[in-house]
Image: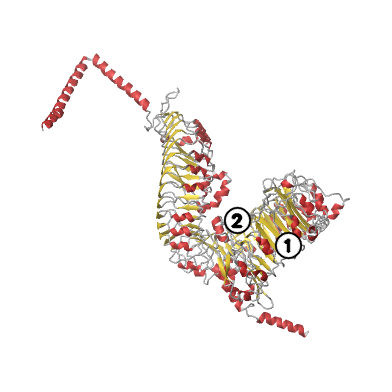
Amino acid sequence: MEMRIMRVVVLLVLVLGSDCHGCWDQERTALLLLKPYFHQYVDGVSKWGQRANCCEWAGVHCDISSGRLTRLFLNTSNSALVHDFFFDPIVIDALTGWGESERKEWYLNVSLFLPFQQLNTLSLTRNYIAGFLNHQENGEMALSKLKVFDLSENHFNNSILSFLGLFPNLKSLDISYNRLEGEIHVQDNGTELRLMNLETLNLRGNSFNSSILASIGRLSNLKSLRLGLGVSNFTGSIDLTELKALTHLKDLLLYCYDDSYSLIATDSYCRLPLQSLGLFPSLKAVSLRGFNIEGTIMTSQNNGTELRLMNLETLDLRGNSFNSSILASIGRLSNLKSLSLTLEVPNFTESIDLIDLKVLTHLEDLTLYCYDDSHSLIITDSYCRLPLQSLGLFPSLKTVDLGGFNIEGTIMTSQNNETELRLTNLETLYLFDNIFNSSILASLGRLSNLRSLRLTFGVFNFTGPIDLTELNGLTYLEDLSLNCHDFEDSSLATTGRPCRLPLESLGLFPSLKTVELDGFDIEGSTRTSQSDHWHTNFTNLEELEVYFSSLRTNILGSIRQFTSLKRLILYDCEMNGNLNILEGLCEMINLQELDLSYNDFKGNLPKCFSNLTSLEMLNLSSNHFRIPISLEPLFNLSKLKSISAYDNVIYAETQIPFLAPRFQLEYISLSCCGEVGPFPGFLYHQHDLQSLHLSNIFFEGNQFPNWLLDNNTKLESMYLTNSSLSGPLQLPLASHTHLSYLDVSNNFLNASIPTEIGEQLPSLVFLNMSKTHSIGSIPSSFDHMTSLRVLDLSNNKFEGKIFFRNSKLPNLRVLKLDGNNFSGKIPDLLSKTPSLVALDVSNNTLSGRIPRCMGNMSSLQKIIMSNNHLQGTIPIEFCQLDDLVLVDLSVNNISGSIPSCFNPSQITQVILAKNRLTGTLPNTLCNSSTLVTLDIRENFLSGNIPSWIGGLSNLSYLLLSKNNFQGEIPMDLCRLKYLSVINLSHNNLSGRIPPCLNLTTLGDADYLESVMTGLSAFSLNEAIEFLIKNVYNSYRGRIIPMVSLIDLSSNKLVGEIPHQIGNFHKILALNLSRNSLTGPIPPTFANLKQIESLDLSYNKLSGNIPTQLVELTFLSAFNVSFNNLSGRLPPRVAQFGTFDDVSYMGNPFLCGEPLPKCAGTGPSPPKPNSSADNDEDYGFIDMGVFHVTFIVSYTIMLLTVAVVLYINPYWRRVWFYHAENAATFCYYFVLDNILLRRFYCGNL
């Protein structure tokens, strides 16, 4: 007894006396020295130091007796906190902290780990580490007890191998997905001997050649090996004989992949004889991926190979290529307990025969998938047919997972057969994406020991209600998941589909704990007269999840009987009505999570919600609830931690509650909508908030709630967008080290940014203060925000220079300063932000040249500098920006030519409009297959329009107006199948309009989803202008993909208008004015049902105006003035009743309102002649008619004068008298003023 007391005392001394903080001081100090290297990317490291006991820090594990650090995990997570309302992919990428451009490789000083003398596990996954420094000094002493070392997903090369030799006790090593390559030499420095204790090795995702096998073969103590083989280094058959010394190997995983790390299985690469696995007699688990083991079989029984694999328990051959002969080979591995196979359709036709596997009597886990050549699941009548009764061959089966099979019509054998009895151990059955009909339910109903059942019903095989009564024998069933799925379009079936399910049928399973339903029409009565107490079988039900279904609201009255329910999710179930129907839920006192989001509930929150005292999470989002801003109906829920109620109606009560809430929230989202009076007072009592969303709620007369930061030291994100906050931004009294996301955009701060913001909020990752009417300049304290990735100060009144001298924001990825009054030059210090991906400084008054150093910012994807006073040339260094997606330098004074080397491989938008560029379009752009927008309007470019533009397969917006282009419009433009806007106006183009032009509206194409959504509103800021009624209309932002425009005006185009233009049914505006087009107006223009503006003025068009044009109900601008049109105008109905005579002027042979009436009811006035060969432009005058009428009129005048003189002798004498006087006057005038002057000058 005394000895036991002494042991307890000693233990307490070790625990309490070793260190006042629960961990050793030197180790605590060492961790704080490591913090700056990992706090931006490793979850929880930024909070190191907030607690005194470092053993409680994230990723740190200590020995409970000594307090010494034994395990350390510094793994970068795949993604950081990103919220749903970040739509810009650039911003999302910036916040996730992932991608090759996010972090640069670096070297870690291993001496920082010296204090951790008892460290046995170290994980540094995904940190971009390229190597270690000072690893020769005391490295062995520092980490001599290290047994588990994880360096996966870094940038190590072969030099890491010499460092690994410093750990003689290392048993597990993971250096997968690094940059090791070629062969490994470890004999020279003794590294091999130091790794002889290694038992687990993971080398996947490197570029070794075949010599790696010999190197690994010397690690004789290996028990687990994971190796990836690149097809570029391993061709033909894979020889595993060099690994034969690994007699202790128990776990083997081999992958074969191509250069993109995609699994590959072909006839010519990665061929692996399955019998070669017999080299490893201790093998218990084998996983192969991407190999061609087609036709290979186990060796005969006379060979020892089979016997050496008798210990194999797990075999995973998914993602390989083999034929049916593989089954006979596997069938002799009698000790197998787990088997996973994927069967390719070309190799497995008709029925799958599992009889060759009948010897696997110990098999407990079976996974079978069937897919086609593209590795997609395939479900047809002719392939992958599997009799369900064949599963009875395996009496020990506990788990079965089948996918992609046609088991339609197959059933379990009768009770007289032993098959059913042999499946009595089956506990888990997954049948996702298979074909079967309702007869399968009777088969499954006899599997009486099933604990988990997951089925996907094909909507084409199940009509009417799904009858689950045949499953009533599953009395032990605990987990049930049912999906109704349309295999053809991969969408869940909802209302109107044949998948109908009475909720009471779930009462057949008294042991149910979890139910998940997807895509059902759950309607009808909830109980029947024969089963009034059906709900009594739900006493064990803890989780009920219903997604994308049609759930009748009256069923909620029955759900309240599920008294044990802890989790209830009714997501997007088409539920509606007043919230009084929810009062039935108030009796569920054990409920911990309630999700009613994406329905159509209306009304106030039921007061009885206060009875849900166990509730921790509440989601009411996207309904029509009326929720008081005080949340007073929920005050009694002391365990409530999270409430999400965005997209509802938030209102202010007439009386403010006096009591404080009992809950302490960690997450709250009430964004949108309503006017709620002052800022909610209940937030004064919240101290554990981590995320706050109160955007698009209109608060009255409130300044920025700085007290939120003072009261909630754990707050990580705060979003107050468009909340009518006024007054200056106020910061907390003390530095707030947790706040990472702050969005106060679209408010009325009307003040400068606090100068100390960088010191007070040093951990900010995302800061959005756009549209806040802020003034002043950018404070120098921004230098302290070393974690800042997204900074948006756009559309304010900031002035001065962009940043200050020597400013550094090393992790900044998105910088938006557009719409301000910044002046001066763009600073060269931007090059000190190497991770910058997007830069927008448009709509300022910046001047000077574009810095050449920007060419060194290799991460740049978007550059927007439009509407400034920049000058000089486009830096040739831009040619180095290979990742560039968007460049917008429009509306500046940039001169020179476009660099001939400019050809980013992923460029989508080139916008250089309204500058002073000269020269021709560089041919290097011809390879830009991703280019969507080419906008170089209003420059001084010349030459022909290049024919290679037709090869830009994704080009949608071609804007070349107001340049000096000449020649014909290339026929190659007809190859542009996604062309939506083309503007070639105000050039010197000649020839005819290509009749084969294609025009589409991207809003109607799948292309919009694949291309335009990636551009986002961030890149659609430049407007597309179009001339309508002599006024330029602008299309900007998300409206651009919805419009289709053609402008070929002010050129020298000839010929007739192609009638094919009438096929552009979605075109919004067409301008062909001020050319020399001839012929009639095509009647097919009546098909342009969406057109709003049609301008054909100042051409040589002839004929009538087609009366069918009156059917264009959206036409608001119509101009055919100054042509040679004739005949009666279309009736003044619909839109044509709004056009005045200006639309028709200059056509003298047109008549009818609003022009002069046509003469009588006879035929129309004669049509004027026209000459298509006359190259000179005479406006509206037909010169042939003019010449004829002039000659006739002159002849008539002469004849009239002669007749008058002949008849009247008095007028005849007077006419001859005046003629004689005129002749005499002319004679003497010539004699006196011309002839005498010449004679006089000659004598001189």
Of 984 and 1155, nearer the camera is 984
Pointer 2 with pointer 1, Cβ within 8 A: no
Q: Position of residue 546 (x, y in %)?
A: 70, 54
Residue type, mark 1 in image: Lys
Write down the quadrant of residue 228 in the picture.
bottom right
Left or right: 485 as drawn, with respect to 1053: right
The disc placed on residue 648 is 2
Residue reaching furthest front? 188
Q: Position of residue 1171 (x, y in %)?
A: 40, 28
Residue reaching furthest left? 1244
Comparing marks 2 and 1, which lies closer to the viewer? 1
Q: Which residue is mark 1?
A: 244
- Compared to residue 508, the image places residue 1073 above or below, namely above
- Compared to residue 873, the image places residue 957 above or below, namely above
Residue type, mark 2 in image: Asn
The disc placed on residue 760 is none
Label 2 sits on a secondary structure element that is loop
